[in-house]
Amino acid sequence: MALKIDLEKCIGCGVCAGQCPFGALSMTGPDGKAEAGPGCTLCGSCAEACPAGAISIEEEKKEGTARVEDYRGVWVFAEQHGGVLHEVAFELLGAGRGLADALGVPLGAVLLGEGVEGLAKDLFEHGADEVYAVDHPALKDYTAEPYADALSALVGKYRPEVVLAGATSVGRGFVPRVAVRLHAGLTADCTGLSIDKEKRLLEQTRPAFGGNIMACIVCPDHRPQMATVRPKVFRKPEAQPGRTGKLVKESLELAPPAVKVLETIRELEGEANVAAADIIVSGGRGMGGPEQFKLLRELADALGGAAVGASRAAVDAGWISAFHQVGQTGKTVRPKLYIACGISGQIQHLVGMNSSDRIVAINKDPDAPIFGVADVGIVGDLFEVVPEIIKALKK
Amino acid sequence: MHFAVCIKQVPNTTQVKINPETNTLVRAGVESVINPFDENALEMALQLKEANPGSKVTVLCMGPPQAESALKECVGRGADAVVLLCDRAVAGSDTWATSYALAQAVKSLDEAPAMVLFGKQAIDGDTAQVGPGVAEWLGMPCATYVRAAKIEGGKALLERAYEDGWEKLEVALPCAVTVLKEANVPRMASLRGKMAAKRMEIKPVTAADIGADAGKVGLAASPTRVVRIFSPPQKTGGLKWAGEEPAAVAGKLVDWLREQKVV
């Protein structure tokens, strides 16, 4: 694909230059007419805006090959909240490192926020070769629009071939906007990534239909190849103290956010979050009611402060808040130990927890599918077994 | 005030077939329902309509002719108008091309909406990408994972959930939101609504009718390609203890946990 400017038709009005999200168009062509610079991503904004119909994006027979080659490097979005990096940022560095090595390109990390450049050190020590940092008041609290503006501008300028972000509420909120703007392919919620070295393609694997089907998706003719990746799918790499890299500070002009954050309420204050816990005790339909979750909290305490999780059935019944939900529509977890109590093991639940290091299941029904993924399955009444486990742990 | 709701019809089953030639899903012959999260988006729009007298709700859907039944259900529940985008040209669209087509459909409405609502994601694709994508095409701010919304002083006041809490947001109109299940309990169709739905004649629109650029819709305009579909790998179960005394089996488990050094 290529941007074509018909100088016969161009009236030199400058509308396109104002419209270009990447500042790639200028009125520096012959007779003050439009000219495209290297920042052009073929997004087509200018072609749409041009009142004279002078700009078009020409599809060539062999679509994109020349342009695709202009893109090099693997980037990860380093999500941070209040100056603290999200664990998924490190997990992405781990995954991204492997992809970058397979492609023979550097691994970059994108840091957006206010006063967050200090986090670059931690990113370098976990595998980043380059950190692209944008420091701006509009990026202090996460809102989708300035985040999308900043990432789009960086990608437009530096042209990485792969961009990964966590499939968190932040990543899934703003990355789709970036993909639309760049006409890039975006695969949601990936659980596997690999490289087809010959074609330099990112192979993205993700569950669909509630985990009943896995799909492998590629993006042959558009760049960058973008994906959001589930937290806890990849392991955080070991830190390499003293490892360093190149810090690129980028100053951008960003519009003030259209969304104002009035207040932030942390629901899980004082309670372990399933997304980060090493041990999770989870309850499902077999719990029978909200009161019975107390028993799981006791077991969690006896295990030294484990988190309490829940299946969708328990959340939908209103027995416990959605913040505890594990599974396709909840959180994906990968603890050292997952104890499933009264959970039958619908595929939607299994996809959220079956990569846990060890799984213990307690269920009355000997045919419950949860036993198919359990390292240890106990067929029995959880209300009889769990109190005995608590007793035995206290011994 | 005008509220637009984008809905998707999804298969009401886990038995989904794939067309091996195009690697796209075969939706014909499978019973379809309104995507459950979209029902929450519709309910939120209907409640906003009730709270803001003089408002109306328009429901938009891109899909096959059978999607008419989903739109009629929405009318039964209180939607005032519907748009069915039904065109072979949009078939095989990924989230990029779908969000463009839906944005064009929203742009084609006589009255520009103050808010465009979506379910948080569709239960078939689970991408959650179309809502923010449409917002991008429309140049609107978008709040995802919203569990409460009201309009005050010409602005939207929203509650947005994130992983371990939620935020109160103030957003200028027009804006887009994607709605969580816990936002509300969708109402049933009323008798009056059902009559209105029965009377309503839904004339599908084509991509050309809504001014969509043929080069931006359908499989050809979609950057992503599904190259392979397979069943998830099955993990095989390990030890299984049945018919033992609770105290004995609990003791065995704790021994095992200690052996594994997890406690």
Image (cartoon, rainbow, N blue to C red):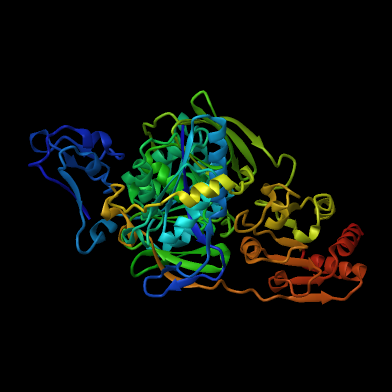
Of all residues, the one furthest to the top in this rendering is B153
In the rendered structure, the answer to whether residue A305 lies left or right of residue B226 reads right
In the rendered structure, the answer to whether residue A188 lies left or right of residue A153 reads right
| Residue A267 seen | yes
From the image, which quarter does the N terminus of chain A lie in? bottom left
Q: At 12% across and 36% down in the image, what residue appears?
A: A33
In the rendered structure, the answer to whether residue A351 lies left or right of residue A247 reads right
Q: Position of residue B98 (x, y in %)?
A: 39, 53
Q: In the image shown, does A378 or B92 lie closer to the viewer?
A: B92
Q: In the image shown, does A233 or A143 lie closer to the viewer?
A: A143
In the rendered structure, the answer to whether residue A9 lies left or right of residue B53 reads left
| Residue A242 seen | no
Task: State the image quarter where residue B220 is shown.
Answer: bottom left
Q: In the image shown, does B263 or A10 lie closer to the viewer?
A: A10
Q: Position of residue B15 (x, y in %)?
A: 55, 71
Q: Position of residue B46 (x, y in %)?
A: 55, 39
Q: At 19% across and 60% down in the image, what residue appears?
A: A60
Q: At 26% across and 59% down in the image, what residue appears?
A: A64
Q: At 57% across and 62% down in the image, what residue appears?
A: A210
Q: Position of residue A315 (x, y in %)?
A: 70, 52
Task: State the image quarter where residue B242 is shown.
Answer: bottom right
**How many numbered discs, if any?**
0
From the image, which quarter does the C terminus of chain A lie in? bottom right
Question: Where A301 sits versus A380, above or below?
Answer: above
